[in-house]
Amino acid sequence: MSVNLIWRRRLFVLEEALQNVFLQKLNSVYISEELNRWGPKNGGEFTVKSTYGLVVTITTTAGRVSPEEESIFRLIWKSKAPSKVMAFT
């Protein structure tokens, strides 16, 4: 796989070094033609909601999250705010 990045401006020296590291890591990634499968819900297909549910289940059953924090997580999920605002929250 070959990636050709086009930038709007010339990169600074530090940015060029970071780009080279990024491209090395990217080139080591293997992409298969198989479909992503995730858990028993939704026919085994990945969804953000099922992943969120899994994270909530793991953290709440492990006793890492208080009931108050759990209710906050539920409110964040149902929020109409943009996703970047919810992630920041």
Image: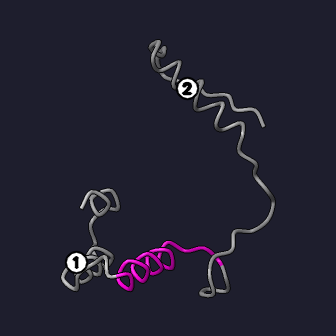
**Relative horizontal placement of residue 27, taking residue 86 as reference (left or right):** right
Prevailing SS of the magenta stretch: helix
Q: CA distance from mark 1 to mark 2?
A: 38 Å
The residue labelled by disc 2 is 19
The image's colouring method is one colour
Tag 1–tag 2 contact (CB < 8 Å) = no
Q: Which residues lie in the magenta part?
A: 45-62
Q: Secondary structure at mark 2?
A: helix
Tag nearer the camera, 1 or 2 = 1
Task: Name the residue rendered at 60%, 24% in the picture.
Answer: 20
Q: Residue furthest left?
A: 68
59, 49: nearer the viewer: 59
Badge count:
2
Q: Position of residue 78 (x, y in %)?
A: 30, 79
Type of amino acid under label 1: Glu
Q: Is residue 57 magenta?
A: yes
Residue positioned 45% across, 17% down in the render: 14
Circle on res. 31: none
Residue at 75%, 68% (x, y): give it.
35
Q: Position of residue 50 (x, y in %)?
A: 51, 79
Q: Which mark is residue 69?
A: 1
- Left or right of 8, for residue 20: right
Determine the residue positioned at 31% across, 76% down.
Answer: 64
Q: Secondary structure at mark 1?
A: helix
Quadrant for the C terminus, please. Answer: bottom left
Q: In the rendered image, which quarter contains the N terminus?
A: top right
Looking at numbered disc 2 in the image, what kind of residue is underneath it? Answer: Gln
Q: Is residue 56 magenta?
A: yes
Q: Nearer the viewer, residue 72 or 60?
A: 60
N-terminal-most mark, 1 or 2: 2
